[in-house]
Image (cartoon, helix red, strand yellow):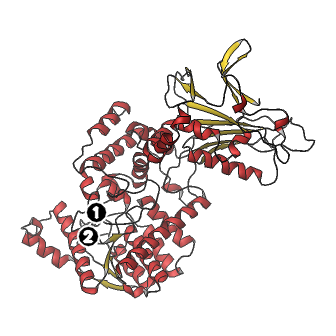
Amino acid sequence: FNCAVVIYQGQILGVVPKTYIPNYREFYEKRHFAAADMALSKSINLLGQTVPFGNDLVFQASNWPDLALFVEICEDLWTPIPPSTYGALAGATVLANLSASNITVGKAKYRQDLCASQSGKCVAAYLYSAAGPGESTTDLAWDGHALIYENNELLAESERFSADPQLILADIDLERLVQDRMRLSSFADSVGNHREKLVQMRRVEFEFALPAGPIPLKRSLERFPYVPSDNAERDARCYEAYNIQVHGLMGRLKATGIQKVVIGVSGGLDSTQALIVAARTMDRLGLPRQNILAYTMPGFATSDRTKNNAHALMTALGVSAAEIDIRPSARQMLADIDHPYAKGEPVYDVTFENVQAGERTSHLFRLANYHGGLVLGTGDLSELALGWATYGVGDQMSHYNVNASVPKTLIQHLIRWCIETEQYDGTTAIVLQSILDTEISPELVPGADDDAPAQSTQAIIGPYELQDFHLYYLTRFGFRPSKVAYLALQAWGDRATGRWPEFLPDDKRNEYDLATIYKWLRVFLFRFFQISQFKRSALPNGPKVGSGGSLSPRGDWRAPSDSRADAWLAELDANVPHE
């Protein structure tokens, strides 16, 4: 048999024979080796030890349920159903492959694809190590290719054709794998479909020596999980997200037979993204951009900059543009409800703010009735998560929302991507850049005379870049708050480490200490779990854009509107230093 021996702390845990013996092209192993299913015994004597023998062994850490290892050899991976598939279904989270694999032109890429695919299908880590220098080169050559994948993501790779011995290391998040398997109903169904084979798998337990103290994390974490730092990957992500938005709106217009879109344009990020998506949608449908009825609706605190940007963008895109001053109708509403502001008192409470948001939305829906159009929503995923939207007759409501699954950090990069890839003309690009450079604010409370906003959204609900990080790891993986805080500290604790998107200027490369992370994560948990779900429970339709990137009550996030955040806050307080 061609075997792998599993050894831990000087003890042989088991011996795994190769399942599939290749006998084609340069491979003729059957003259030397038998396949695993030819074994006559389930144990062998090796170096004075009687040890388990077979391709049905799962090596399970008795003191760490998430750690379970399965081993296969070379050709096993190249088959239609690799043995590691059954190992994963039997509970193995780490799949290892010892491979005497020679190298030919193009084979390395094929290996990568196989390892990535197997780790993804099995929701597992896949460790692969090929033979290197020292093997006979009579007819073959060797590149010493080593790979570590986690659920389709490459964590580490060796230098190929190196003359020196190499060791690659990576941090594998076993909890992430286990939780993803729990989430995937098809994984559990596969276990059920293969139960007859899986019940015959044997578990070999060993006690794993847990580290006595903290170990620095080797793994590099993306600061912007929705926005890759790698240029090519980021471009691909933006291309997909943008076109998902466009095709989502195309589908809704085709299904309804409606040919006009009504949208409020504030000069901010969200309405900008929705407007340029609407413009491209009209182009793709062969409809004139004048079918986009765009309205900027200044209120009591609208700045000249955002108002000018709104007009400039509407003009540059060639849409039907108009301005409606909502202050008269807002004053009437405030007077009708006997609000102090109507009597001249400077009371800028939540009612004062929501009256303006409500007037804008009310106008848009009546305009849609009048013109036979569809109200296009603009609110983004980050705002929905934090409840930063006016419910009902407000910016929470629309007929269709292309931004509902797009976080704020990705909105910014989508607009930047449209500039860099010249999706629109130069005049439009200049306006888009001006919008990117503007402070994020709801502009509902009057500010100073210098046209600066009185409100900073991020000063109230936290930095979007940090809150989007929290959102991603809480909703995509379901991690406990203390783990999210730990990951946030690794990603954001030191601005001098890790990769940054190259276009981000130095003064925008922020860092956050643990106290700051704790503060804003607590805000996120309270707002997300306790006071915002009722807004998401009545969410308009909109296309899902990213993996785990939807809070639709009809899809990814089905939650009660009257839930409490106590359990999440208690876990955070108990496990994260904060005094």
Q: Is residue 181 left or right of residue 375?
A: right
Q: Is residue 397 above or below residue 194?
A: below
Q: Badge 1 local density, few (<14 within 10 Å), some, or many (20+)?
A: some
Coordinates of residue 265 in the picture (x, y in percent): 34, 75
Mark 1–mark 2 CB contact (< 8 Å): yes
Q: Badge 2 local density, few (<14 within 10 Å), some, or many (20+)?
A: many
Task: Measure the C-alpha gap from mark 1 to mark 2.
Answer: 8 Å
- Label ID, residue 196: none
Q: Amino acid at mark 1?
A: Ala
Q: Is residue 395 left or right of residue 145?
A: left
Is there any visible trace of residue 419 in the rendered image? yes
The secondary element bearing badge 2 is classed as loop
Q: Is residue 307 above or below residue 241?
A: below
Coordinates of residue 4 in the picture (x, y in percent): 72, 29
Residue placed at 46% from the left, 61% from the top?
410
Residue placed at 29% from the left, 84% from the top?
372
Coordinates of residue 5 in the picture (x, y in percent): 70, 25
Asked which quadrant contains residue 148, the reply is top right
Residue placed at 68% from the left, 35% from the top?
72
Residue with the mark numbered 2: 301
Where does the C terminus fall, quadrant-wise?
top left
Dot 1 or dot 2: first in sequence order is 2
- Label ID, residue 454: 1
Residue placed at 44% from the left, 64% from the top?
411
Q: Is residue 91 above or below residue 23?
A: above
The secondary element bearing badge 1 is classed as loop
Q: Amino acid at mark 2?
A: Ala
